[in-house]
Amino acid sequence: MTAVTESAAADLVGSADSGTDPMVPHRYRVVRRRLETRDTVTQLLEPLDEPIPAFAPGQFAMLYAFGVGEVPISMSGDPSRVELLQHTLRNVGAVTGALCAARPGAVIGVRGPFGTSWDLNSAYGHDLVFIAGGIGLAPLRSALLQALSQRERYRRLVLLLGVRNPDELMFRKDLRSWKGLFDVDVEITVDRGAPGWRGQVGVVTTLLPQAPFDPDNAVAFVCGPEVMLRFTALGLSQRGVPAQRIRLSTERNMKCGVGLCGHCQLGPVLVCRDGPVFSYDRLAPLLHVREL
Amino acid sequence: MTDEVAGIATRLAKHPFLAGMPDVHVQALAGLARLQRWPADTRLFSEHRTADRFFLLEEGLVYIEMPIPGQEDMVLETVRGGDVLGWSWLFPPYVWHFSALTVAPTEAIVLAAAGVRERCEASPEFGYDLIRRVAGVAIQRLHAVRLRLMNLYDPTPPRR
Amino acid sequence: MVADSASPETCRPRTPTTTEGAAARAAALADVALADVALADVALADVVVLSPPGLAALANALIGDGYRLVGPTVRSEAVVLEELESADELPWGWDVDADAGRYRLRRRADRAVFAHAVGPQPWKRFLLPPASLLWRARRGESGFSVDPPEDPLPRYALFGVRSCDLAAIAVQDRVLATSAHPDSGYRGRRARSFVVAADCATPAGTCFCSSLGCGPAAAGGYDVALTEVVTGEEHLFLARAGSAAGDAVLPRLPSRPATPHDLDAARAVVGEAAQRMGRRLDPDGLPELLAAHREDPHWNEVAQRCLSCGNCTLVCPTCFCTTVVDATDVTGTVAERRRHWDSCFDLDFSYLHAGSVRASTSARYRHWISHKLGTWPEQFGTAGCVGCGRCITWCPVGIDITAEIAALRGGVPEGGGL
């Protein structure tokens, strides 16, 4: 074995084996599990290995269920609590099913945090309007907690939440406590009422025309299924919020989370690397193209 | 103009539904309007009754609903302060298609339908302005209903 | 991209005009040398001349240094890339007849060894293997433990890499090795590799590297570059080093100094090759062209022909998409994560919740060609196509990337197409 001399390749890509492998998960133990709805759970995790770096609201992690697989899930916890991770996920397939079933004591794998954040820091001095559809509340919860911890930096805080029916409301304790705050406006609407429901009925976009914020000075943060993103962005535009101040959290198939596997392309962007949070001016020409 | 009519005209001009309407039309509407408030759980109108009025809600929350035998009334939609309630008064046979129930204490400007219709006939300019506003609201509500039809928040069928 | 200015010059595809977001990255690449004139800059003193036995000695020296020699050889009526035991296995005296959907080996009158343009397989087969183990996890007291693969990464000597493929390796370096989260397997294999480039003297009918600035001469990114000259009695390889490792190996081989006549002959070979490309692709404004044609009915027309087989993605030297498969042994105590090449033509590729985002063939073809020629610069600061022509040759129905672009531009492609 010779070849101690520098090769062209080593010169171009650096010497081998430096850095950590972004594909290897960190082990976390589930310490608490709370059933949010019939098929949705929130889990609190503590690290068994070196913890992943601190996350910013809006970023996601790849969660691994032993032998079953991995899914991208947004963090839903308080970003200032670095010792514990919190996420909220819905049982919609084999991997999310296995993860949802993980009870306190179980160990799961975590890679991350990956992607762009809601970037609340760039919204100092503005009205913050959080608009969530269904489980889209999870990544917005992190942002709202951060905004509340720095309340004086922002003007109005508004949360508009739409769910299918009252049974699908998650984070009920948080919602109750935020509703009780004099300087936060929370409006919830359901597609279909139920016995005991005394709130609004209608899709979340119907809340927009009268929601208490100043379109000239508001930043909107929207999370939910893609159709909801499109129509909410449209409603915000009609209200006069400029596209650069509408931020949307998008979803695509992801395998690696770090821009290596190519799955999450949406036209020119890689959702895992350039997103998941994008401003609407960037996304508008892409979201409205069929099968992009 | 009485003080009361003047007060109503001021409130009409402030209502989002009439935003930007020429003053002369607002004044005319004020003559056909009165203010009313109701506690929660008051029925504002019922299916198949004469639609002889409509409501510019200022405060409160109202269910638009439909009774179903053997079940709780089905709530189709809510309207609230800032919204307009009722458009069956615009077209024959002038009967309500659904029912309306207050869910919270509610305050509204109530407009007499016959007078408004007469003024629409007398002034096509006023009629066009008003019908455009009603059409705008109707389109918004139609869009919202379409979105609900597709199950907006939950495109994935739950796993059994 | 400060790092680039310090790196040796590599043959990177000429980056087409890009949309604003990538303009800065594109500008950083604007200064790369044009590969079709690179030999003009080579000084006589930097070149040695090898005979065919000298070439064999180079192969043996690399094997002796512990490299696994991989290179072209004839198998199954094609020139494939495989691990070789000696230079004897190289495709001496073969070239190819290639066109859209067509590939035939031809016997040559001479013994030229690098006259076969490129075969179906790209070198990513070794640097980014079609299937690899990422890690293995074992159930244990604390849930489970994760271990990296035990086998050491191989040290490959890539023997006879054409300029288009050098450019493709540079593209994959950009995507996989110098990104924010480099792929450790690719980077490890790549950093250990030794590259012997071969200038191209005989482009095939589907080649268009020269129109993208990726050939036919190797302009950088190699340890040793060879120019094969076959004229009458003469069969020579002009060899030049491109790195310290290349500098170290050349003196160990039987060679003679190059003469001005040798250099002229080599330049003529490469210069003529640049004129004999079977296809052409105008790179100007491709991102804008493709972005402007997202809703074009032409994609439906292509979909009438496209079988969605994914051959183009498998033979493409820059296509890097992969998927992962998680599995356990029968007892459920050992889990593995394996990575496989994936193709954007596969329905599952874009699966989200209840179905595929790109369900139609037209959307999948549009995605592939738009990624390759349109969005790659914005994503990675380099073009995604190097003009090797494999996707044209190996498309079972002969869909031609250059012809589809010409059709979008509203014209007939120059110098080829269906």
Image (cartoon, coloured by chain):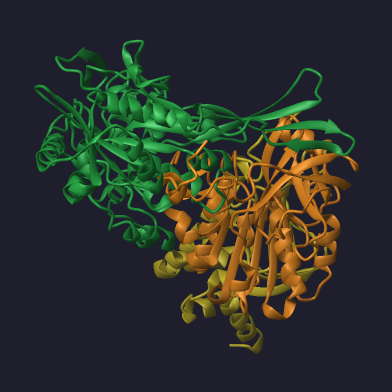
Q: Quadrant of the C terminus of chain A?
A: top left
Query: Against C385, is C300 above or below?
Result: above
For chain A, give the colour: orange
Residue C344 visible, this orientation: no
- Chain depicted in green: C
Residue closest to the eye, C125 or B137: C125
Residue closest to the eye, B16 or A174: A174
Residue located at (80% from left, 23% from top): C332
x, y percent for residue C111: 20, 18
For chain B, give the colour: yellow
Residue located at (63% from left, 72% from top): A121
Q: Quadrant of residue A174?
A: bottom right
Question: How many dots with numbers?
Answer: 0
Residue C76 visible, this orientation: yes
Residue located at (32% from left, 52% from top): C9
Q: Quadrant of residue B85?
A: bottom right
